[in-house]
Structures are given as structure tokens and as C-alpha cells.
Image (cartoon, rainbow, N blue to C red):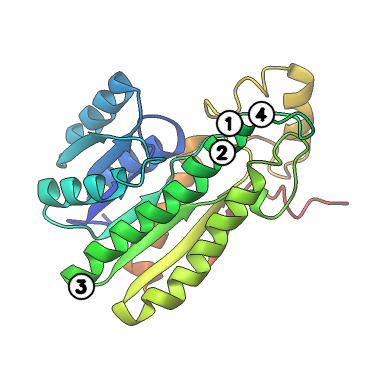
Amino acid sequence: MLLEGKKLLVTGASAGIGRAIAIGAAHHGAHVAINYHADDDGAASAVEEIERAGRRAVAIKGDVADPDSAPAFVEGAAEALGGVDVFVSNAGICPFHAFLDMPRETLERTLQVNLHGAWYMVQAAAQRMVAQDRGGSIIAVSSISALVGGEFQTHYTPTKAGVLSLMQSAAIALGKHKIRCNALLPGTILTDINKDDLSDPAKRSYMEGRVPLGRLGQPEDMVGPAVFLASDLAAYVTGASLLVDGGAFVNLQ
């Protein structure tokens, strides 16, 4: 129960990594609010899982690409749960596409969701935490793609590098308020984002072969690292980045 009684908010939590973190945090004692864009059934089932763990839960619908969704989510969640102790900025998209003929709308939507959305959400959460005057933890889900390139991710990798940089700068800006800011950098995690890309058995086998631990990640693999950064065990950790990739990044030779 590393998060006993804490109020934790997660964006993009109707599926994938966000959902796993939301439910995992509940099993560690947190009350949880989730943001989601369109998947009503997924959000409802996530709330049921959190409540089944004996914790309070609320789902608030909103598109993180809309700056107004940030204060709406944070304030709505804080009212429902009684404050904000931990904020996890997770919402993101990666519509794989070649660079030379990238549609403008694909680039713009990716920037709006992944980078602008994270910025506004983190700002809203920080404003609430400062007003509460009891510190807090902000975690942003960046990616191994913040550190390496991808042929069909020229729109995506810059956003994840931006999210990593956001956490580094926010750690400096918010340290005086006892708010810690850290980034999680998942490797290849099996989610809806990449299921089509990895539907080719040869591609999946190749990706698995690059991971020293011998498998691709599951959303649940992100729970432990997130809970650690959210908890008092990480009381002196801020401005840090934690790779959760099965060793893929270091396997370059």
C-alpha cells in the first residue's frame, strides 16, 4: 500500500498503459480519477476495477488536445476525490507514417495530443498542487523514442523528447513547491498504439530479439515504476527519467 489514501489522476486511462497504472495504483491504496477521449466502455470498466479494489474512482471525458480540458479534468477530479497528490500525464497517439508525405493534419494532431496536451495538463495539475500547498508528484509518460529515432515516427519522437524535457524543466520550476517531476520512458509496450505495426510476425519477432529480457512489454510492466515515482520511496527523486524497456536501449551492439 505505497499510495495509501493518495489521490491520483491519469490521462488516457481507458486502455493501455494509463489503464494499467490507474488500476495498479488503486491496488496500492490510491483513489483514482481517469481522463479518456472516446472509449466510454473502457473507461467504465476501469472505474469498476478501481472500485473493486476498494477505492474511489471517477472518469472524466475530454480531449487533451483541447487546452480547456486540462483545468476541467484536474478540478473535476480534485472535487470528486478531495484533492490531487499524484498526476500521471499519459495520453498519447502514434499514427505511424512515412516522413516525406506526412499529412499536415497527422503532424498537428500528434503535436496537440502528445506535447501540447501534456504541457497543459501538467500545468493545470501543478497549479492545483501549489494551491493545496502540500507538494505532490507529477509523472509524464515519455518513451524510449525520446532517445532514439524511428523511420515512421518523425512526428512522434519529437513530442516524446519534448515531454522528457518538460519534466526536467518542471522539476526545476516546481521544486520550491515540493512537487517532484519525473519521466517514464517505456520501450515497446503491447498496446492499441502499436498492435497494427506488430501484427506482422516477422516484425514482432525482430523486435523481441532486440530485447535482452526476451519479450516485449505489457502495460502492467509500467505499474511498478509509476507507483515508485508516485510514492514516498522516491521522495528525493525529481528531474529523473526511468527507462522501462527490458534493456532494449543498451542493446546496440
Vertical position of residue 64 compared to residue 227: above or below: above
Foreground mark, 2 or 3?
2
Mark 3: secondary structure = loop
Q: Position of residue 251 (x, y in %)?
A: 79, 50
Q: CA distance from mark 3 to mark 1?
A: 41 Å
Instruction: Name the residue rendered at 52%, 54% in the picture.
Output: 184
Residue on which disc 4 sits = 103
Vertical position of residue 119 compared to residue 32: above or below: below
Instruction: Name the residue rendered at 47%, 41% in the picture.
Output: 113
Q: Earlier in the sequence, mark 2 or mark 3?
A: 2
Task: Choose top left, top right, bottom left or bottom right for residue 108.
Answer: top right
* Residue type, label 4: Pro
Residue on which disc 2 sits = 108
Instruction: Name the residue rendered at 47%, 63% in the picture.
Output: 182
Q: Position of residue 15 (x, y in %)?
A: 40, 29
Q: CA distance from mark 2 to mark 3?
A: 36 Å
Q: Is residue 140 left or right of residue 242?
A: left
Q: CA distance from mark 2 to mark 4?
A: 9 Å
Q: Position of residue 119 (x, y in %)?
A: 43, 55
Q: CA distance from mark 4 to mark 1?
A: 5 Å
Closest to the observer: 42 or 205? 42
- Residues at circles 4 and 1 in contact by the CB criterion of under 8 Å: yes
Closest to the observer: 87 or 170? 170
Q: Earlier in the sequence, mark 2 or mark 4?
A: 4
Vertical position of residue 6 compared to residue 236: above or below: above
Crowd band around label 2 with a 10 angstrom C-alpha radius: few (<14), some (14–19), many (20+): few
- Residues at circles 1 and 2 in contact by the CB criterion of under 8 Å: yes
Q: Residue furthest front?
A: 104
Q: Is residue 214 left or right of residue 58?
A: right
Q: CA distance from mark 1 to mark 2?
A: 5 Å
Mark 1: secondary structure = helix
Residue on which disc 3 sits = 134
